[in-house]
């Protein structure tokens, strides 16, 4: 924290903690006039709270501010009893000036709990071997080594993240030539002094200096804010401000700030958030290397009200249009060419509360190139009343976001119905209407598995609400009389059974099946699957009919209800893997990625739909991939055509994985698997070198849970 000044009164908060229901605050405050300083805590309505205060000897503070120690008793140690859930205000005054500091006991309690796991969880995590190791460590290496061992074992995700963030902060920033002027646009409305000063200070601390800060104050004659802006504007001419005299709403205030911008690029910053010191440097460098770029966004995290604790990092993928239609995942830090910002008409008050979402949708619709910087460069200040911490506190924002998304679809000439995700506020699902009743060919390879195939086909027939489909069973050298009798029964019921007489080759069998398909759309389906969602075909078909989409995948579950497939990520587990595999079925996953429609580089052909014309355009499945990776290779070929692969979580099936063929248990199978893996890597080296565009490079590649790679340098 820095030293804050308000007229002739200066103060600094060293520590703010909570023990039980007692808030404990220490720091110092002194009046340059020499007047005594008083402290009082009130509730938000002004009701005074009984406060215990004692003075502390702080010669360091007096010397720092006054140059000598004549006010060395300026330190304070303050305690008061609180109610969790209430908000309080610490008032520091010298009789002429005063400072107000917001105190949120609930936030302090949350911050304290984030450092280490609870004692109850610690006991549950500990076993006899750990106790034995701890005793050995204590005897051989001493208490400090034991403490380090405990920290490594029991520290929370938030504490690990703090360490990771420190390691990943950019400190070496060489000059890269003349960069563009970047205008940081900020709508201001009665911002607490502390937060306003810290926001402005974060811009002034930028290592990249070719910026201007455009602030539009809609506080409506709020003198405290005006004085701060006037004072700072006089000290730094790059800080430009406009006193609006009235509150024009979030969009109106932002447009006023935008109208002041002179830079080629505009960056959006909320009035109480802060930027990482390297934010503008990294943005300017990326812009200079991508002349066609019109939009740029970065990763972000949340930060406690006192800026001491960072948490909940949002590590985003590169541009994913379907994910953006599910949630404003781009959010902060967002930069756009000023001419594009003006072209789309700035911000609309029709969507106040989600005006940023509306603006981002408009800008990305028309952007030539959209850049993503996978670095934490924006810190979103969070408190219980903020959408950053408690999304249900501003449900009107999500209703506005729904309307913004509907307007986006209309501008794009796309039919679609937008629904709020009631279980996960702030997320949406777009349902596209099925056009007509095109024939869908469902292709199911099978060998001998009578009961498995029967369960699969029964679930299709009994549960599917879409009826214009044909089922084609791709028979591959079955040996039992039982399956032959079942095939005859299926054929009597209208199912076609076609014979593949060659050796097993999943790619070749499906290519053979397509040659017999009459449908305009192809639905590849494993025989060891069973339908859960009745509208599963509609969920795939409606997406597949979109001209920009080449393939659609489903959400598959193991028999125990955990997730088997929620999209394929390249480089995961060495070459590629199913993300979120093993997640509990009810768990939304990191950033709700397990429950929102989005784009991936690939999906599994255990349940995948594509257009027949797209299948033929990419020459179907590559038959060199006899068993593994043929579906991944197919999707990457689709992506190479500029088409999207969409994963729809509402298309749900159970998948009894590899029941028919088993796993790679023999040396021959293992050798073939390694050969096909090497072939995929050789065919698509860009994914191995650059990573998966739909998966943030800061996430782990050794586990499917989308956790941070804390081992990275």
Image (tube, helix red, strand yellow):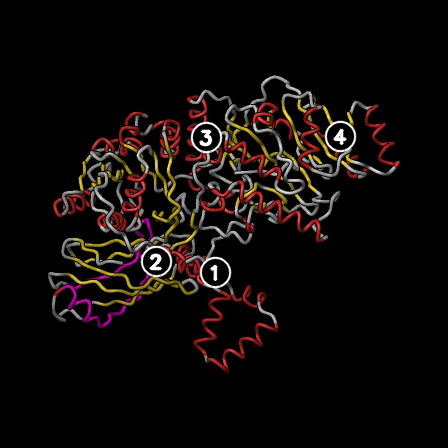
User: Secondary structure under badge 3?
Assistant: helix
Instruction: Classify 320 as above or below 465.
Output: below
Q: Which residue is mark 1?
A: 156
Q: Are marks 1 and 3 in contact (CB under 8 Å)?
A: no
Front-most of residues 468 and 677? 677
Q: Which residue is mark 3?
A: 402
CA gap between label 4 and label 3 equals 42 Å
User: Secondary structure under badge 1?
Assistant: loop
Q: Earlier in the sequence, mark 4 or mark 3?
A: 3
User: Secondary structure under badge 2?
Assistant: loop
Q: Which residue is mark 4?
A: 473
Instruction: Classify 674 as above or below 543.
Output: below
Q: Residue at 32% of width from left, 29% of height from top?
A: 347
Q: Residue at 15% of width from left, 55% of height from top?
A: 96
CA gap between label 4 and label 2 equals 61 Å
User: Magenta stretch?
Assistant: 36-65
Badge nearest the viewer, 1 or 4: 4
Front-most of residues 697 and 513? 513
CA gap between label 2 and label 3 equals 34 Å
Disc tally is 4
């Amino acid at each position: 924290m820095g030293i804050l000044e308000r007229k002739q009164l200066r103060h600094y908060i060293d520590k703010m903690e909570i023990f039980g229901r007692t808030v404990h605050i220490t720091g110092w405050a002194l009046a340059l006039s020499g007047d005594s300083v008083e402290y009082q805590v009130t509730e938000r309505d002004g009701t005074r709270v009984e406060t215990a205060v004692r003075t502390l000897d702080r010669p360091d503070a007096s010397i720092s501010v006054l140059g000598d120690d004549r006010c060395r008793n300026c330190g304070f140690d303050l305690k008061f009893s609180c109610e969790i859930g209430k908000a309080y205000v610490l008032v520091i005054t010298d009789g002429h000036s005063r400072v107000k500091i917001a105190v949120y006991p609930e936030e302090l309690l949350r911050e304290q709990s984030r450092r280490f796991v609870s004692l109850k969880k610690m006991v549950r995590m500990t076993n006899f071997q750990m106790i034995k190791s701890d005793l050995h460590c204590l005897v051989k290496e001493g208490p400090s080594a034991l403490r380090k061992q405990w920290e490594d074992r029991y520290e929370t995700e938030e504490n690990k993240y703090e360490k990771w963030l420190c390691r990943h902060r950019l400190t070496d920033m060489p000059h890269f030539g003349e960069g563009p002027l970047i205008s940081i646009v900020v709508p201001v409305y009665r911002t607490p002094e502390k937060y306003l000063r810290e926001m402005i200070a974060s811009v002034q601390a930028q290592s990249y200096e070719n910026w201007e800060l455009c602030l539009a104050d809609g506080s409506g004659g709020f003198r405290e804010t005006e004085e701060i802006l006037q004072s700072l504007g006089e000290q730094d001419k790059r800080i430009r401000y406009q006193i609006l005299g009235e509150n024009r709403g979030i969009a109106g205030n932002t447009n006023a700030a935008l109208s002041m911008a002179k830079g080629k690029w505009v960056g959006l910053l909320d009035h109480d958030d802060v930027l990482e010191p390297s934010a503008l440097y990294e943005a300017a460098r990326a812009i200079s290397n991508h002349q066609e770029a019109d939009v740029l966004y970065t990763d972000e995290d949340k930060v406690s009200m006192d800026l001491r604790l960072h948490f909940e990092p949002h590590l985003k993928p590169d541009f994913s249009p379907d994910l953006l239609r599910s949630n404003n995942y781009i959010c902060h830090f967002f930069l756009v060419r000023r001419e594009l910002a003006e072209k789309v008409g700035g911000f609309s008050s029709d969507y106040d509360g989600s005006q940023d979402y509306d603006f981002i949708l408009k800008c990305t619709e028309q952007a030539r190139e959209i850049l993503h910087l996978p670095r934490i460069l924006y810190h979103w200040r969070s408190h219980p009343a903020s959408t950053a911490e408690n999304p249900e506190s501003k449900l009107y924002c999500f209703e506005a976001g729904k309307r913004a998304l509907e307007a986006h679809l209309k501008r794009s000439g796309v039919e679609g119905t937008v629904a709020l995700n009631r279980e996960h506020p702030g997320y949406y699902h777009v349902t596209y209407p099925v056009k007509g009743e095109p024939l869908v060919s469902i292709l199911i390879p099978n060998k001998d598995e009578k009961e498995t195939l029967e369960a699969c086909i029964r679930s299709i027939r009994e549960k599917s609400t879409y009826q214009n489909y044909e089922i084609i069973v791709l028979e591959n050298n079955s040996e039992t009389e039982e399956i032959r009798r079942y095939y005859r029964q299926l054929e009597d019921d209208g199912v076609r059974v076609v014979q593949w007489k060659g050796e097993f080759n999943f790619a070749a069998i499906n290519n053979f099946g397509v040659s017999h398909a009459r449908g305009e759309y192809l639905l590849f389906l494993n025989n060891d699957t069973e339908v859960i969602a009745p509208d599963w075909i509609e969920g795939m078909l409606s997406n597949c009919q979109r001209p920009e989409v080449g393939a659609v995948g489903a959400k598959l579950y193991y028999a125990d209800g955990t997730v088997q497939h929620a999209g394929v990520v390249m480089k995961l587990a060495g070459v590629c893997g199913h993300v979120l595999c093993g997640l509990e079925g009810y768990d939304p996953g990191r950033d709700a990625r397990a429950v929102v429609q989005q784009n991936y580089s690939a999906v599994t052909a255990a349940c995948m739909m594509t257009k027949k014309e797209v299948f033929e355009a990419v020459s179907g499945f590559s038959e060199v991939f006899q068993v593994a990776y043929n579906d991944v290779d197919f999707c990457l070929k689709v992506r190479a055509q500029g088409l999207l692969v969409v994963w729809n979580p509402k298309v749900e099936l159970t998948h009894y994985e590899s029941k028919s063929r088993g796993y790679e248990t023999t040396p021959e199978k293992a050798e073939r698997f390694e050969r096909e893996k090497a072939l995929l890597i050789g065919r698509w080296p860009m994914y191995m070198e650059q990573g998966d565009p739909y998966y943030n490079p800061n996430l782990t590649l050794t586990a499917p849970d989308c956790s941070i790679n804390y081992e990275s340098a």
